[in-house]
Each structure stands twice: as structure tokens, then as C-alpha cells.
Image: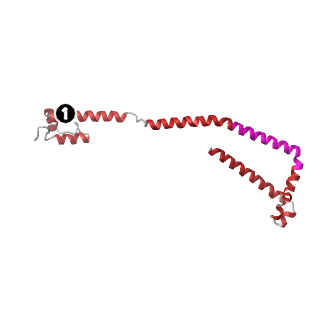
């Protein structure tokens, strides 16, 4: 036996590590710890460390300062983008309303001439060469051109919306 260790130190260490000290400890080992200074010091230090560890585990875990700073910067940037985007959204809504009002006024003012223009549009664009002869002789050409133009207008609006959303 060396002067710096005890024969029963290993038993005490195992009981402490497993959390069985002092409840599941034999009476002779408890009596040994009371009489042996090395084992008593081992028990005192280990229980102090275990209590400190439990207290530390109960404390809330804080995130790293870098992550907190990054989130704050992201929030600040998003607020700035929203603040800048509000007038732009207002201008877009204003332009849309003006466009709808102008289109309604033009339709009310020149509705009959616009209908004649749309009916004559396939002939002016020489689209008859692309359409089968059965359709080009009837007035069905206007019923083809108008939905095609409406689809192109709708798709162009969607493309513009998606392009402005990404920026």
C-alpha cells in the first residue's frame, strides 16, 4: 500500500460514480470513509463536483454570441428591406389602379372600335397563314386571338411578379 492511496478507494470511487453514495453503501465502507482521510477527501470533493454539475445543468443554456449577433443583423436587415419596400409596394398598387382605370375608360369610350380592331387584328398580323382554312373563314379567329393575348398578358404579369419578388 502506498502512502498516497487507500485499498478501498476504488470501491468508494465506483459507488460515487454510479450515484449510490451513501444510500446503497455497505455500513463497513461508510465506517471506513469516516476513519480514512483519503476516502473522506475523495467523497467530499466528488460530491461537491457532482452538486456543482447538477446546478450547472439546471441553468439555461445560452446560444453562442456569434449566432445571437447574426440573428440581430438579419432582423435589422429585414426591417430595413421592409421599410424600403413599403413605398415601392404603394407605387405598384397605385400604378395598377391607374392602369385598370385607364383601361376601363378606354373600353367605355372606344369599346365598339376596339372590338372591330380586335376582330381585324388577325388579318393585320397575317395570322391567317398560320391558321387552318376552316377557322380563317369564320369569325372564330377573334375567339382564338383574344384568349392567346390574355394568356400572354397573364404570363407576363406572373413573370414580372416573380422577378421582383427575388430582388
> Left or right: where does residue 90 sit relative to residue 50?
right
Q: Is residue 119 above or below residue 163?
A: below
Residue at the image position 78 percent from the left and 42 percent from the top: 99
- Pick whichever, 102 or 39, lies toward us: 102
165 is within the stretch colored magenta = no
- Pick whichever, 111 or 48, lies toward us: 111
How many numbered marks are there? 1
95 is within the stretch colored magenta = yes
Overall secondary structure of the magenta section: helix
> Left or right: where does residue 5 sit relative to residue 51?
left
> Left or right: where does residue 155 sit relative to residue 34?
right
Q: Which quadrant: the N terminus?
A: top left
Disc 1 is placed on an element classified as helix
Residue at the image position 36 percent from the left and 34 percent from the top: 58
Spot occupied by residue 6 in the image (x, y as percentages of width and height):
14, 39
Which quadrant would residue 166 be assigned to in this image? top right
Q: Residues within 10 Å of mark 1 (few under 14, many from 20)?
A: few
Q: Which quadrant: the C terminus?
A: top right
Which quadrant would residue 57 be assigned to in this image? top left
Q: Which residue is mark 1?
A: 41
Give the image's coloring scheme: secondary structure
Residue at the image position 59 percent from the left and 35 percent from the top: 80
- Pick whichever, 2 or 166, lies toward us: 166
Which quadrant would residue 89 be assigned to in this image? top right
Residue reaching furthest to the bottom: 133
Residue at the image position 68 percent from the left and 46 percent from the top: 161
Spot occupied by residue 91 in the image (x, y as percentages of width and height):
71, 37
Q: Which residues are drawn in magenta?
A: 89-113
Amino acid at each position: 500500500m502506498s502512502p498516497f492511496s487507500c485499498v478501498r478507494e476504488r470501491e468508494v470511487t465506483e459507488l460515487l460514480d454510479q450515484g449510490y453514495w451513501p444510500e446503497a453503501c455497505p455500513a463497513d465502507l461508510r465506517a471506513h470513509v469516516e476513519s480514512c482521510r483519503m476516502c473522506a477527501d475523495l467523497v467530499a470533493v466528488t460530491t461537491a463536483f457532482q452538486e456543482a454539475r447538477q446546478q450547472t445543468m439546471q441553468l439555461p443554456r445560452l446560444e453562442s454570441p456569434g449566432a445571437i449577433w447574426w440573428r440581430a443583423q438579419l432582423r435589422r436587415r429585414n426591417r430595413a428591406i421592409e421599410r424600403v419596400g413599403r413605398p415601392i409596394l404603394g407605387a405598384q398598387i397605385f400604378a395598377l389602379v391607374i392602369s385598370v382605370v385607364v383601361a376601363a375608360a378606354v373600353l367605355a369610350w372606344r369599346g365598339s372600335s376596339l372590338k372591330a380592331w380586335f376582330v381585324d387584328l388577325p388579318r393585320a398580323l397575317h395570322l391567317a397563314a398560320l391558321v387552318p382554312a376552316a377557322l380563317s373563314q369564320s369569325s372564330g379567329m377573334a375567339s382564338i386571338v383574344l384568349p392567346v393575348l390574355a394568356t400572354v398578358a397573364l404570363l407576363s404579369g406572373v413573370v414580372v411578379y416573380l422577378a421582383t419578388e427575388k430582388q
